[in-house]
Image (tube, grey):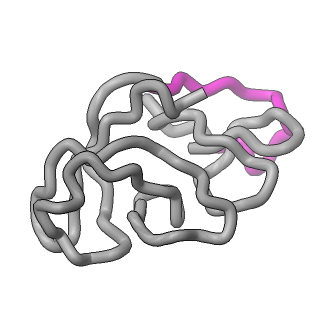
Amino acid sequence: MNINAAGYATNATDTAGETFAGVAYETVDNSAGTAGALSIRVETRGTFVFVDGGANGAQTDVGVTFKIQDNQTLTDASTTNNIIAGIVVESISSTSVRVRIDRYAS
């Protein structure tokens, strides 16, 4: 998830003015409320499995910083805003990687 330019939690996207907040600990739906009406707990440390948007699944991904494509997908390729989510610690398959988010989540 990201923090948008207004300072609110939002689904992670490669959007200008947003920063990576971490991985949501829970699901919160505030679509019917005003901005800031609800809170959400966020994991800012640890390793988490994400979809590999580059889908190369290579061992050479280990140690590489991955950037946000969307709420579930990261990539080692350049993105428009290059919002870094963390460093790959394991290439699990051709479509998934384990990423350590420590020091990258705000």
What secondary structure do most residues of the magenta stretch adopt? loop
Q: Position of residue 33 (x, y in %)?
A: 83, 41
Rendered residue at 31%/35% (across/down): 100
Rendered residue at 42%/58% (across/down): 72
Q: Position of residue 60 (x, y in %)?
A: 17, 61
Residue 37 in magenta stretch: yes
Name the quadrant containing residue 76: bottom left
Q: Horizontally, is 43 left or right of 58 in the view?
A: right
Quadrant of the drawing holding the C terminus: top right
Q: What residue occupies the far bottom of the structure in this picture? A: 55
Q: How many marks?
A: 0
Name the quadrant containing residue 20: top right
Is 24 above or below relative to 93?
above
Is 43 above or below relative to 33?
above
Residue 1 in magenta stretch: no
Residue 86 versus residue 9: which sits nearer the camera?
86
Name the quadrant containing residue 40: top right
Rendered residue at 51%/26% (across/down): 42
Q: Horizontally, is 33 left or right of 15 in the view?
A: right
Magenta span of residues: 29-43
Q: Horizontally, is 54 left or right of 94 in the view?
A: right
Is 41 above or below relative to 13?
above
Q: Position of residue 99 (x, y in %)?
A: 29, 43
Quadrant of the drawing holding the N terminus: top right
Rendered residue at 37%/72% (across/down): 53
